[in-house]
Amino acid sequence: MIEVIDLSFSYNDRPFIDMNFSVKKGEIFGFLGPSGAGKSTLQKILTGLIRSYKGNAIVNKTECKSYKDDFYENIGVDFEFPSLYEKLTGRENLKFFGSLYSKKLRDVDELLKMVGLQNDGGKKVSEYSKGMKSRLNFIKALLHNPDILFLDEPTSGLDPNNSRIMKNIIINEKEKGKTIILTTHNMVDATELCDKVAFIVDGNIKALDSPHNLIMSKGAAKIKYTFMDGKEEIRECMLGKTSEDAKLQELIMSNRILSIHSSEPTLNDIFAEVTGSVLQ
Ligand SMILES: Nc1ncnc2c1ncn2[C@@H]1O[C@H](COP(=O)(O)OP(=O)(O)OP(=O)(O)O)[C@@H](O)[C@H]1O
């Protein structure tokens, strides 16, 4: 669905974006990286907003720099800062943006209901809270039922309940076969939602795989055990080396373990290990 081949781009003389990757139909693909890594720049290239790149950025069989008008019929974009008309109501905004497409639109009231705005469609957007604007901007991207969604921090600034609603909608869209590019700083969301993630630092991809594979290949799971030795003691041991831990073996043989827990590294730990920087 998306092919990026020898893509390079620079805002000035200094080379910046330099990468290769592909995204299959029906995948949720995460761009993860610290502020200034180039995630938004990459999204701008893939949505045809930056055309002065070298190499190939092919979205839905179209080279992004030479797109025709119908390019946007199949792309939905929810950038981090909502682009809405404040003097229009939520429903009027959706109707206006919907009128820009030639495709059959999704039902506006159904979309409003999906994100809990069913009683707010008649209010002017200037009266919306930040979170309400985010939710309206999000359904604006779904309005024309596009095959590809570009979502930039869709859960940022939302309370846990609304964040859950948005994540469920994203999962639902994936189940319908949509391809989703998700830009986020949130490793928990990325681990839950993404089939693949690319760690982006300084315009380059430092690692690309499923969250599960990244966690399993790079990090080592540990166990933590407690026992009484006059007072309560806690020790750690690598999960793959339990047979080499003499104290652990002795405690097992004498049934003296009080508790035992295993812990896997998080995607955040792996990000720190691979890139040398911390996201959260
Ligand atoms: N129009 C522009 N002209 C010149 N430099 C720019 C322009 N837009 C972005 N940059 C620079 O490019 C780099 C990457 O910016 P970009 O917005 O792509 O980062 P990001 O990973 O999306 O960051 P964030 O997580 O903060 O949104 C930054 O150093 C930024 O200052």
Image (tube, rainbow, N blue to C red):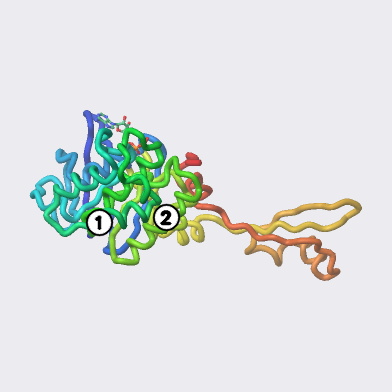
Please, what secondary structure does the residue beneath circle 2 have? helix
The amino acid at mark 1 is: Ile
Residue 226 shows in this picture: yes
Question: Which residue is under mark 1?
Answer: 148
Q: Is residue 203 visible?
A: no
Q: Which residue is mark 2?
A: 167
Q: Is residue 264 left or right of residue 244?
A: left
Can you give x and y, in whole percent of width and height, for residue 93 in the image?
24, 43
Q: Position of residue 227 (x, y in %)?
A: 82, 58
Picture layout, residue 133 above or below residue 14: below
Q: Is residue 260 above or below residue 87?
A: below
Query: Residue at point 50% right, 48% down?
Result: 160
Please state which of residues 188 and 174 is positioned toward the viewer in this rendering. Answer: 174
Q: Which quarter of the rendered picture does the N terminus lie within?
A: bottom left
Residue density around tag 1, few if under 14, some if 14–19, many if 20 or more, within 10 Å:
many
Helix, strand or loop status at disc 1: strand
Ligand 1: quadrant of the figure: top left
